[in-house]
Image: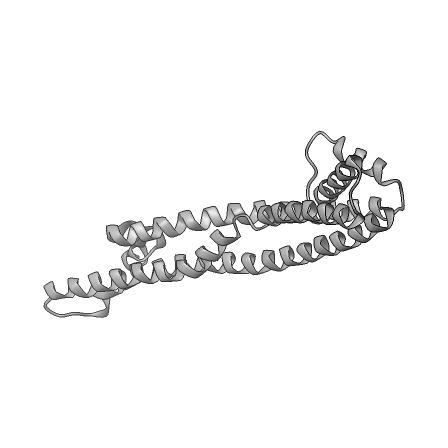
């Protein structure tokens, strides 16, 4: 019973040395923050995908572009995603056309630059927090390994004061040290999986946005 109690998870964590406990705390905080970002990013990407679907349905119904622009800008919150790209391009196109005396190529190029700027802003927002997940996924195992090495080193140093070393003397120290590696893997694996999944999702959205820019540019060229 004493061995089981001594090797319980709580007992091992509380009995670890201060450097190992600091490593565990850092990894635990990194894991909590990464999970928070994972849930935020899941909701953000799902919303971006739904908004892109809704805007494409409204755009390809063949309605008046002026009316669509008014509906996009009439919302309480600013347009997001594909609607933001459309708003920027059509606003710049209308502004340049209102000035008069400009070539069609200049109108189209101005609208394209405005859409590209909006496209870059949208991608920056979609990529937010992904570098943190990548860092947690790549660094956490090494931080956990640092705690493990430190704990094992202390365990073997403690054997210097023991006349006859047995597994019972060294097992608690090694178990304490290995918990740091386990926590590091617990923080790293979800972060890596989420990073790869979210990156693929962002890439798909970026392709949809770029395709829309090209298609809308052709429509504006015919309209001009």
Of 159 and 6, which appears nearest the observer?
159
Which quadrant would the N terminus be assigned to in this image? bottom left
The location of residue 181, given as percent across then percent down, is 37, 61
Residue situated furthest front in the rendering: 101
On screen, residue 43 above or below 171? above
Q: Residue at x 68, y 54 (%)?
A: 205
On screen, residue 90 above or below 167? above
Q: Residue at x 32, y 53 (%)?
A: 23
On screen, residue 110 above or below 206? above
Q: Residue at x 39, y 52 (%)?
A: 27
Of 85 and 145, which appears nearest the observer?
85
Residue 173 visible to the viewer: no
Of 122 and 218, which appears nearest the observer?
218
On screen, residue 7 above or below 122? below
Q: Residue at x 40, y 57 (%)?
A: 183
Q: Is residue 93 left or right of residue 25?
A: right
Residue 194 visible to the viewer: yes
The location of residue 57, given as percent across then percent down, is 83, 47
Q: Is residue 191 left or right of residue 153?
A: right
The location of residue 13, given as percent across then percent down, is 32, 52
Q: Is residue 120 left or right of residue 75?
A: left
Q: Is residue 203 left or right of residue 72?
A: left
Q: How is the image coloured?
A: one colour
The location of residue 165, given as percent across then percent down, is 16, 69
* Total numbered badges shown on the rendered structure: 0
């Amino acid at each position: 019973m004493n061995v089981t109690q001594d090797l319980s998870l709580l007992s091992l964590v509380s009995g670890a040395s201060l450097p190992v406990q600091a490593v565990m705390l850092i990894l635990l905080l990194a894991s909590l923050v990464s999970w928070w970002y994972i849930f935020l990013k899941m909701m953000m990407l799902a919303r971006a995908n739904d908004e892109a679907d809704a805007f494409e349905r409204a755009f390809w119904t063949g309605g008046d572009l002026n009316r669509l622009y008014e509906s996009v800008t009439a919302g309480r919150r600013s347009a997001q995603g594909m609607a933001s790209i459309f708003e920027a391009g059509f606003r710049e196109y209308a502004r340049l056309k209102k000035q008069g005396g400009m070539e069609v190529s200049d109108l189209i190029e101005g609208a394209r630059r405005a859409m590209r700027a909006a496209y870059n802003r949208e991608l920056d927002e979609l990529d937010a927090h992904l570098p943190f997940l990548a860092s947690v996924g790549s660094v956490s195992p090494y931080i956990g390994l640092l705690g493990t090495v430190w704990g094992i080193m202390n365990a073997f140093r403690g054997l210097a004061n023991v006349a006859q070393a047995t597994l019972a003397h060294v097992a608690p120290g090694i178990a304490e040290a290995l918990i740091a590696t386990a926590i590091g893997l617990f923080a790293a694996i979800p972060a890596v999986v989420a990073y790869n999944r979210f990156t693929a999702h962002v890439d798909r959205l970026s392709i949809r946005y770029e395709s829309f820019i090209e298609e809308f540019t052709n429509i504006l060229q015919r309209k001009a």
